[in-house]
Image: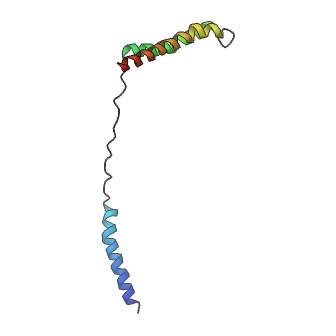
Amino acid sequence: MFTGIQEILIILLIISGIIVLPRMMNPRPAPQKVVLRRAPLRLSWALRLAIILTILWPVAWALYFKPWQQGLVPFATVGAGPVLIGWSLKWVLAGMKNKR
């Protein structure tokens, strides 16, 4: 009575073994994805100098004025002001250059 069902189950097991077992033994390598990378940002020597001065200028004036004690307004005008004005001018000039 159950011999017919057993034969069908054995045939299904053999077929699934033929289909699944080779995939488990030798898996296909995943297709390689192409990763597009932007070119690294190249900084000119002038821009590198500007970045260093942006850091050193306020630090030097902060050590001189000590804004954490009292001299906040002089530090803002002499220490942080020129840095903000300089980068603002660079931003505006770069926008004007790109507009042409």
Q: In the rendered view, tell whether residue 24 sits above or below residue 79.
A: below
Q: Quadrant of the N terminus?
A: bottom left
Q: Is residue 72 left or right of residue 7?
A: right
Q: Residue shown at 31%/69% (left/top)?
A: 19
Q: Is residue 86 left or right of residue 39?
A: right
Which x, y percent locates residue 29?
A: 31, 53
- For the question of whether residue 92 can be seen, the reply is yes
Which x, y percent locates residue 39?
A: 33, 29
- Marks counted in the figure total 0
Q: Residue shown at 51%/12% (left/top)?
A: 85
Which x, y percent locates residue 56?
A: 51, 12
Q: Residue furthest bottom?
A: 1
Q: Residue shown at 30%/57% (left/top)?
A: 28
- For the question of whether residue 66 can be seen, the reply is no
Q: How is this picture coloured?
A: rainbow
Q: Nearer the viewer, residue 77 or 4?
A: 77
Q: Residue shown at 46%/13% (left/top)?
A: 89
Q: In the rendered view, tell whether residue 8 sits above or below residue 32.
A: below
Q: Quadrant of the C terminus?
A: top left
Q: Quadrant of residue 67?
A: top right
Which x, y percent locates residue 78?
A: 57, 7
Q: Nearer the viewer, residue 70 or 86?
A: 86
Q: Residue furthest front?
A: 100
Q: Is residue 88 left or right of residue 8?
A: right
Q: In the rendered view, tell whether residue 11 sits above or below residue 72.
A: below
Q: Residue furthest right?
A: 70
